[in-house]
Image: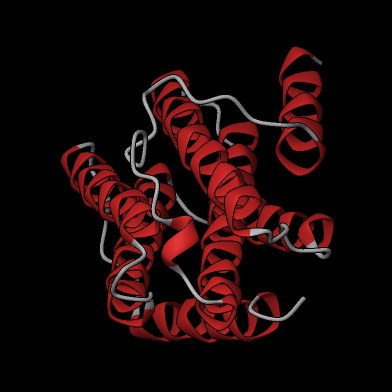
Amino acid sequence: MDALLTTVDRAMRTVFAHHHASRTNPASGITDTNSLSDAEKREASALMRVNHVGEVCAQALYTAQALATNNLSLRNHLQAACDEETDHLAWTEERLKQLGGRTSLLNPLWYAGAFGIGFVAAKLGSDAMSLGFVAETEKQVEAHLQSHMQLLPENDHASRAIVAQMKADEMRHAQEAQAAGAVELPAPIKGLMRFAAGVMTAVAHRV
């Protein structure tokens, strides 16, 4: 029951609450928003909204896996990852507000979908498979963030600073999952994850 209540609490806070970071925003002190054109602000907002949705999905995936596992060590690992990912939610929300943008209107749907995938994957697979999902998710997010470094306006230094720190964190999370015993996921599963991420990216860029 405690685990279920914690899961519900995390879901509500992820989707509906205003988030507070435990670390300093990488963009703190950078004031370049006024140097961006309206078109650049719109594009930067769309990209940061996609990044925010990615963090919502990561929270859902890891929370579902934590609920599904009976391995206390793995549950603690997943919950720690969720806690650190909260920084990313806070940073992207703050940047969206500065740019005059908003988070995705479909965040409850994104969360529910990712939660379902994470829970089923954890129940059907092993703990090593769950860690494999963490590692693969982080690798794909890292690649996605790298592409955004190419797409963000060159003079949007604040967004770039946030994305760079997020990318470094995701790389570390993948390495930690591998060190904890993650197994390599089968190619078809990786492909499905990339396909789902592509759909999410295309829709969240606009909605």
Q: Residue at x 54, y 85 (%)?
A: 198
**Can residue 137 be seen here?**
yes
Which quadrant is home to the C terminus?
bottom right
Please state if 55 lies on the left or on the right of 178 as rendered.
right
Please state if 77 lies on the left or on the right of 1 as rendered.
left
x, y percent for residue 149:
29, 72
x, y percent for residue 116:
72, 57
Q: Residue at x 47, y 19 (%)?
A: 72
Single out the residue that lies furthest toward the front.
34
For the residue pair 24 and 110, the one nearer the viewer reads as 24
Single out the residue that lies furthest toward the top.
2
User: What's the image's color scheme?
Assistant: secondary structure
Can you tell which quarter of the image residue 81 is in? top left
x, y percent for residue 147:
31, 78
**Can residue 123 be seen here?**
no
Q: Residue at x 37, y 23 (%)?
A: 23
In the image, residue 64 above or below residue 183: above
Please state if 204 lies on the left or on the right of 98 as rendered.
right
In the image, residue 128 above or below residue 157: above
For the residue pair 204 and 110, the one nearer the viewer reads as 204
In the image, residue 78 above or below residue 23: below
Please state if 96 lies on the left or on the right of 206 as rendered.
left
Can you tell which quarter of the image residue 66 is in? top right
x, y percent for residue 31:
39, 46
Q: Residue at x 47, y 42 (%)?
A: 88
Which quadrant is home to the N terminus?
top right
How many marks do you count on the picture?
A: 0
